[in-house]
Amino acid sequence: MPAALITGITGQDGGYLAERLLAEDYAVHGLVHDGDLGVPDLLRRCPSVVLHQGDLTHEASLAAVVSASAPDEVYNLAGISSVAFSWEQPVLTADVTALGAARLLEQVWQCQERTGRPVRFVQASSAEIFGDADVAPQDESTPVRPSSPYGASKAFAHQLVGVYRGRGLHAVSAILYNHESPRRPPTFVTRKITRAAARIARGLEHELVLGNLDARRDWGWAPDYVDAMVRAARHSEPADYVVATGEAHSVRDFVAAAFARAGVAEWGTRVRVDQALVRPSDAALQVGDATRARTRLGWKPTVDFDELVGRMVEADLQQVPAS
Ligand code: NAP
Ligand code: GDP
């Protein structure tokens, strides 16, 4: 039975990936850190995962989990995943997201050296490594020029993956564009919007306060992005892959689509912009060209923008049933 180790297993992508690999009869191991609130939900969905206590900031715990799980595939999904939070905690972000990837890569490399068994490593990288790029769409050759502590930390990890690939590890960097689902926390704009649209539709709230409405993002369906990471892990040649839909929409477009789907007319009267929520630096447009993933991996997104918004709004409406 093949074995996989997932860091960040209690996050949005970690849960979808665990479900996917268990369905393929993998032994699935996950790293969970102290006080991880997502554990009960994960165990309800995936009772057979094997959980190991540890933390990306503690190298010894990573050595122990890699050794105990003897993985064929390692997916590094853990990290400080919010750009906004990374401005509040830049040092913690670097420790977890940049140095954490270094600690894990080194442990995986040592495991491969010690046992002689090849291990495949996938890093969840991000469009934020390109910052406010001069070109659109971005692809694997776009210059790495991050503009946030999160982006800089992901850029370090991304480049270190290339270093370990050169050393002989089957190491992949999946340059993920924003991907969403009903499991996305409301700290991210899509879920904040769909949750508010549902609550306003039910009369539980009256106003939604947002930051930059003009930012344009390439939003996809999270399970599709997990599928891309699995395909990349299993391809014979390790490489970097942009994973994106190729279509950009503004935050304003997302609001309009979500409110329409929830049945709320005239969204403009319900939304207020607060400058305090506008970031010190925010890429105007992120849109990816996933040609390499399409041609080499046979990957393509299965859920378009309207369907994504619809699925998220419907899930939020179900959480606040009509009285
Ligand atoms: P997520 O829901 O925020 O999950 C992150 C996971 O990392 C959580 O399980 C979290 O646990 C864990 N974690 C945080 N600090 C840790 C530490 N010090 N040690 C061990 N685990 C730690 O993120 P996601 O949306 O699933 O995304 C998965 C990965 O893809 C992330 O690395 C993210 O940066 C990257 N990515 C995501 C997107 C996107 O649109 N979703 C786009 C580009 C890249 P706690 O919650 O308990 O802290
Ligand atoms: P990110 O791309 O990983 O930072 O994902 P987010 O969902 O947090 O942000 C996506 C875009 O929405 C960024 O351009 C934000 O500036 C913009 N945005 C506008 N208003 C808000 C808000 O109230 N919360 C968040 N999280 N983002 C917002």
Image: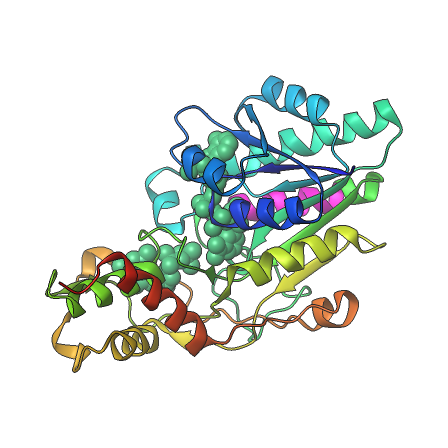
Q: Nearer the viewer, residue 51 or 45?
A: 45
Which stretch did the figure color magenta? 149-163
64 lies left or right of 235: left
At horizontal 57% and vertical 70% (from top left) the residue drawn is 288
Image quadrant, ligand 2: bottom left
Image location of residue 269, percent across then percent down: 12, 77
Image location of residue 122, percent across then percent down: 68, 46
> Please, what is the dominant secondary structure of the magenta stretch?
helix
31 lies left or right of 188: right
Asked if residue 216 can be seen in this view, the reply is no
Image location of residue 12, percent across then percent down: 47, 49
* Magenta run includes residue 228: no
Can you say which quadrant of the picture contains the N terminus?
top right
At horizontal 57% and vertical 32% (from top left) the residue drawn is 100
Can you say which quadrant of the picture contains the C terminus?
bottom left
Image location of residue 264, percent across then percent down: 19, 77
Q: How many marks?
A: 0
Q: Is residue 209 above or below residue 247?
A: above
254 lies left or right of 127: left
Asked if residue 198 can be seen in this view, the reply is yes
